[in-house]
Image (cartoon, rainbow, N blue to C red):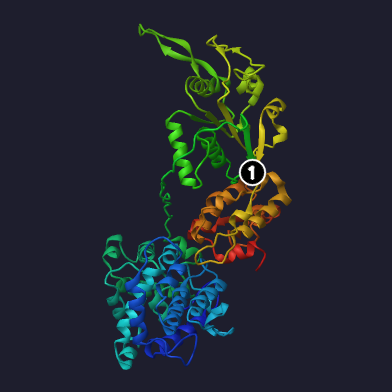
Amino acid sequence: MARYNPVGDLSPLYDAMDRLRSDCLIGDGSLLSPGRQLWTAENFAELQRTYVQNLDEGEGKFFEKLKTQLKDATADGHCLMAELIWLLYAFSRGDVSPPTKNLKVREVWSWSGEELPREVVALTDPVLHGVGRAGQGYNNNKWRELVLLITAMQALKAKSQEERRQVLADSATFAEWFHGQVNGDNRQLRHILPFLLFPESFERISSGQHKRDILTGFEAASPSDVRAMSIAELDTALLKLRKELEAKHGSRVDFYEGDFKALWQRPKEKKPAPVQEADVDEIAPARSDYELNTIFYGPPGTGKTFSTAKRAVEICLGQAPDEPAAVRQAYDQLVKDERIGFVTFHQSFTYEDFVEGLRPRPMASGAGFTLEPEAGILKVMADRASKQQGNHVLIIDEINRANISKVLGELITLLEDDKRRGAPAAITVTLPYSKSAFSLPRNLYILGTMNTADRSISLLDTALRRRFVFEELPPDTSRLVDIELDDSALNLATILECINQRLVYFLGEDAQIGHAWFMGVRTKSDLDRIMAFKVIPLLREYFHDDLERVRIVLGGGDGFLSRSQLPVPNGVEGYAEDRYRYSDIYREESAYPEESYITLLGQS
């Protein structure tokens, strides 16, 4: 039966839904405050006016906008909205933890000027545990689901109590009525609400595409057939399939469990995030009171690349805008104006790439080729700075990844302030390929970045260290303190601190993770993506794919990387030792459970 759930006993939630159906949908009562009349036609008409007809689809956090939208609502209107939020949360498991659900429902209720009692059965962890993953689309589009829910409930409350009882008498009648309220809108409540009210008849599936994939994966219908099916027809076919599988296997079936899931699940496609631009303000005239040679160093994610870009703008224009987008726009314009150059060092980078080298050129006769000197990025930038007014900047990203002595050669001497052209001890060298005289102008600044996770400063060439000023960019969790996630009480600063404490313990200070990776996080889905595509890959690199050690850094347990023991193959029993297969939860679910972060923080 669909009430079966492999994650545990969900009868507390189903009991709460039974009370909601009888007391609130058929009756006009309250789930969180028994005896009170909240689910009334008048209160839903009020929410239709104050919320549905007063939508704010712009930028901003959901609950901040919701509070503003409800500013003219009555106390009962606020309390009813809190119960609707509870209903939206009832299905979702993992993306929002039970404590956060409890906190948010109580917050909305408090806007009425009242406070809920400390002990409310419907707000206990067993009830709020959730049923399955609804996905970030559901979480990020709560306002759309609310519009559907309020509109549908307003239609239900227009009926007499006896008519409501008939609508909710059985699963088929309710589903037919509810789907008629949706008008084709692609909302996940179309799947979620029928299941919550009638879990024996519907699957714990919030996605129409998953329903189609399951039917085709189990060969219960062809792809063309499922595309033509209505939601009601999909649900009927799934119920039939589940009963057949339970009869065949002699056990309860959940389509998201183990071998059943493997038969239908498709890999998910990743979409790139959109790029946004911003206007740049007027910049003051240039100044020249910076060090000529500077290296920004620190662990990954401390903003070294952005810091060099901002410093380059300041050197060229005198100051930089405050907004990061405006800094980048000013930087891009300076690149177009040929005042900023950029190069990334790597292990194969050579003197010929950086200063000058011989390159083949076809002969005028067309027969054969000749080798001619070609300027590298340093010589190109030096020539530009010599011919143009104003300061110029050459940025060398990952400066410690190349063999510095070989890349710079004799030019390492020219880097010193007093060896630059026009200085008291100026030096000019003859380049080996063009045989031309060369010196570095005093208006060419060199900025480098250095990732201390790759190689520590102590291993750098001593001559190079003498010629550069080093500015450390350590992790700065104070930059994350004021970032509040919408729909989650997770604290970014504390999460980063916990990870870095463990990295320092195992690998030392240079292996920490920087704050910059988390600066753009605004939702839990943003945080999940940073963990999946930046933090965990870096940890795998740090620990040479020792995934057990990675799990320890992430707090242990299966919240981020799940572990299952491998069976011992035939013939190797005498040599057997425990071996495991590891799976990244994000690859399967496109999210990490909020409980995984709580475990990381050592709060479970």
Q: Position of residue 144 (x, y in %)?
A: 36, 69
Q: Vertical placement of 22 versus 534: above or below?
A: below
Instruction: Report the residue marked by disc 1.
Output: 473
| Residue 300 falls left or right of residue 458 | left
Q: Residues within 10 Å of mark 1 (few under 14, many from 20)?
A: some
| Residue 7 falls left or right of residue 405 | left
| Residue 494 falls left or right of residue 139 | right
Seen at 39% across and 69% down, the residue is 143
Look at the image and tell me whether residue 198 can be seen: no
Q: Vertical placement of 12 versus 418: above or below?
A: below
In-front residue for pair 581/459: 459
Seen at 29% across and 88% down, the residue is 159
Q: Vertical placement of 470 versus 203: above or below?
A: above
Q: Position of residue 349 (x, y in %)?
A: 56, 26
| Residue 265 falls left or right of residue 290 | left
Name the amino acid, label 1.
Answer: Leu
Dot 1: what SS?
loop
Look at the image and tell me whether residue 479 can be seen: yes
In-front residue for pair 307/495: 307
Q: Quadrant of residue 501?
A: bottom right
